[in-house]
Each structure stands twice: as structure tokens, then as C-alpha cells.
Image (cartoon, rainbow, N blue to C red):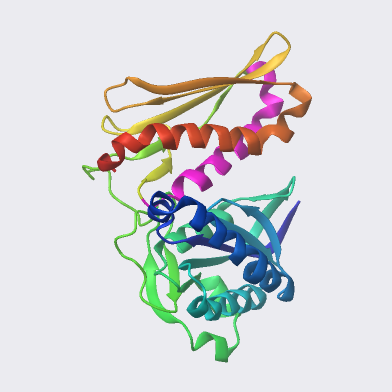
Amino acid sequence: MRRLSAILFMDVVGYSKRMSLDESGTLAKIKSFTDNILNPAISKHNGKLIKSLGDGWLVAFASCHDAVSCSNTLKQSISSNPLDIRFGINSGDVHFENNDVFGDTVNIAARLEAISSSNEITVSESVYQSLEKEMKNDFKDQGPVMLKNIQHPVHVWATSNINQTSSAMSSTDDDPKSKLVLVPIKVDPSISALQPACDRLIDSMFEVLSSKDWTKTLIDQNPRKNDYAINLRADPVAGKVQFSFNLLGPSGNVITSNKFNANPTGVDNIIDTLRDTVCSQILVSLMKFKKDF
């Protein structure tokens, strides 16, 4: 089902560093923020929490006014909250399915969050133009911005200057730094009916992997020689659907790989679990190569 919505992405700034210094304390702070501040604010402003990403949250609203109002409420709470949060909001046509959301509107919201300054709100032109004058006064014009894996420039407004050095900003192919390239999944023709579910898996993996500050993630058929590539396949095996993946380094060596089997009628139900398992394995394996990105 598709409908017009405002999508809010939020994440905890410096999550990895916080976890390395005080894992239990960081998790306790995030739980306290979620239970005592975030959930009441979402309810007050008529939002729906779509998913929690561990160090971030994705929320859908029926209006841009509600999305920005909720973000302002949370932003005001930060002075008495031990966490630093970034906010990104976009609006447009959103595909809702199986309690999840997909599409360019969602991807752009994720990029806007990633370029936002700490404890600030960054929105697209469509959100800004939907606001009343009083709300508009809080935002500064950042101009058109090219975002990673987005084919067209996005006009951006923010409550403070955006982070121009963010990895979510578009980079050119001559960038000497490696990228993490998610190659579109190859689906055996005999199970082509599962293509939509497999596409959702790729979109969902991209959301998770590109939300990390230290990766430069994109979806592309043709990784460069100095990129890290994630290849996925879906094949029929003994009455099951077998999902296999491997992570290749710039030299073509396999860094990590795995296989997962699912019943053909239950593929939709395992997309989130498969995403979380594969992304966790990839990120853990990439930690030793973090300096490349």
C-alpha cells in the first residue's frame, strides 16, 4: 500500500564510541530515552514507530507538521538528556508493507538525518514548504545538496548548518576511499515471484549499512576495484529458498559469507531477521578495514 507520509529518521551521535566506552550504560540511556521521552512524543504527535535500529529510530507521520513538531519536542528535551540525537525528515509517496516502509522518500530521509548536525533537524524542501511560517523561521536554507545514492539534488533546510563532511554526501568515482557496494540481489528465474521481497531485503539492508557514519554505502551493479562488495543470491534448493551472500574485499578475496534457507511461503516473514543477521556479520567483519572508508 502506498500513501503520502512524512518520514522521520533519528540516530544517536557517536553510538559506536559510547558503546566501546560504556556498553551497559549506553544501552540503559537509550532505553530510558525511548521509554520516557521518545515514545510519549511520538504518541502525542500522532506518529507511528516503524522500527528501532538499535542506535536509531524510523517514525512515520500523516503530516509534516506532526513530524517537525515531534522533532522539536525531542530536540527541546536534549538539554536534560544524556544522548545527542540527529533528525532528518522527508515527505512523499511511501510504500507500506509488513509493518515496514520503502522507497526513495525513506532513503532521502535517512540521508538527511546523516548530514544533520548533532541535536539539529534537517528537512527537505517538500517538508519545509508544508510548514506554517512560525515553524519555517526555525530553518536555514542550505541549498540543493547531492546525497549519496540519490540521483537528483535535494533542496535542504536545517535548524543549523549541515555537516558537509558527512559520508552521506555524494562522492565522485575518483574518490580514493573504498565504498561498501551492495550489489542488487540475483534471483533465480524459477522463483522470480520472490523478486519484490528480495528488493525489499536490499532496500532494508541499505538503510542499516548506510546509517553507519564510517561506511560509504551505495547500491550499484558495478563496484570499483578498490570497493568492498556485498553479493547476494536467492536460489531454489531442495524445496527451500536459499539466500547466500559474500563480502568481497578490493582484491576479490572473500572476507565473510553465509547461507540461509527459508520456506518459499515464509520469505516475507524472515526479511527483517535476515537483514539484521547479514548486516551484523558484515559490519563485524568490516571493523578491521574501517580505515579504508
Left or right of residue 126, residue 35 in this image: right
Give the answer, above or below, for where 228 lies relative to 233: below
Q: Is residue 219 magenta?
A: no
- Horizontal arrangement in the rendering, residue 155 relative to residue 92 (left or right): left
Q: Is residue 9 left or right of residue 270?
A: left
Residue drawn at x 30%, y 41% is 290
Q: Position of residue 284 (x, y in %)?
A: 42, 35
User: Which residue sits furthest top?
Assistant: 238
Whole-percent x and y of residue 53? 57, 51
- In the image, residue 120 sits, relative to residue 234, either above or below, namely below
Q: Residue furthest right?
A: 265
Residue 269: image location, x then y, percent:
73, 34
Query: Can you tell which quarter of the image residue 166 is in?
Result: bottom left
Q: Quick one: 152 or 191, which is closer to the camera?
A: 191
Residue in the foreground of this view, choosing between 84 and 45: 84
Q: Which residues are magenta?
A: 189-213
User: Which quarter of the figure is the C terminus placed in?
Assistant: top left
Looking at the picture, tell me which residue is in the foreground, 140 or 38. Answer: 38
Question: Magenta stretch: dominant SS?
Answer: helix
Q: Is residue 236 above or below residue 41?
A: above
